[in-house]
Amino acid sequence: MLKSLYVSAFIAAGVGGLVVSVLHVVDEGLTSPWIGTALACLGPVGFFARAYAAPIARTSANMPLMLITGAAGTVLASVLGASMLSAPVAVAAGVGVLGSALYLFWYSRFSAPARVVLKTGEMLPDFELAEGGSIVRSRDVTAQAALWIFYRGNWCPLCMAQIREVAAQYRELAARGVQVFIISPQPESHTASLARKFDVPMRFMTDAGNAAARTLGILEENGLPAGMQALGYGSDVPRPTVFITAAGGRLIYCDLSENYRVRPEPAEFLAVLDRPGATA
């Protein structure tokens, strides 16, 4: 619950701090200490704006530029005359340094799963998914090799970028006899809307109530940013997860994200599938 509240507050504080800073700079000029605050807020705001405007599937683990701009902005605000307890420095340090550090090293990272279910070499557990009003059991769709992607929902820009990457790679996967399942707990109407954007035969499925995610040990309770419930999303989401099964359902690759911003490259999937006997 804390992470859910935190990330929404962090984004709001960043945007609010940047707007207030710009207004002060316009009124007071370029010597205003608020210019440092604007720089500090620009790091996180710029990242989220970029993520939604030009979606990226992954970042570096620590994103040092965000912390550097936060620290530089805080120092600049104090150099331009603001005391350490003044509003410009407090906002710069709170958003650009403390807020960014919490986002990078706490919010973005997942704790170790309470139980690891997905293990290379093991058989895929049985679970159910919804597809177009019908129920599909995992054991009924494992006759051929498959790439499975559990994503948090259409609201997550990194998830959307990852799905676009896989869609662009679809012909290479199909040539290897691999079917692709894209799975989320969001309402089926949201999933149908996403499926219409892709002219490739990937199967977009719904994990109603996160039942499959719970079975697979990848459920993150209260992982939805606070306020997104108003758009129809549930509070619990799956940890971004990718796994590959050979024909028959044996797991040959598993990636349970430890950091939602750090995701496997598409070339990694092809490399796994090209190993001798991998999909048999």
Image (cartoon, helix red, strand yellow):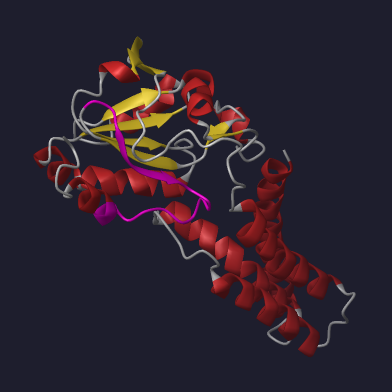
Q: Left or right of 31: which side holds 215?
A: left
The C terminus lies in which quarter of the figure?
top left
Residues in magenta, as a range:
248-268
Is residue 164 visible in the rendered structure shown here? yes
- The mark tally for this picture is 0
**Can you say whether 52 is above or below 113 in the image?**
below
Picture residue at 24% right of the left edge, 36% below the top: 198
Seen in the picture, residue 33 relative to 232 is either above or below; the reply is below
What residue is at 39 percent from the left and 54 percent from the top? 57
> Is residue 208 shown left or right of residue 76?
left
User: What is the x, y in percent for residue 63?
Assistant: 53, 68
Query: Which quadrant does the N terminus fall into?
Result: top right
Q: Nearer the viewer, residue 4 or 49?
A: 4
Residue 80 visible in rendering: no
- Pick whichever, 268 or 19, lies toward us: 268
Q: Is residue 12 above or below residue 64?
A: above
Q: Is residue 171 left or right of residue 225?
A: left
When the figure is inspected, residue 20 is found, relative to residue 27, above or below; the finding is: above
Residue positioned 66% across, 64% down in the render: 100
Residue 158, position as x, y percentages in the image:
44, 49
The spot of residue 136 in percent (x, y) is 33, 14
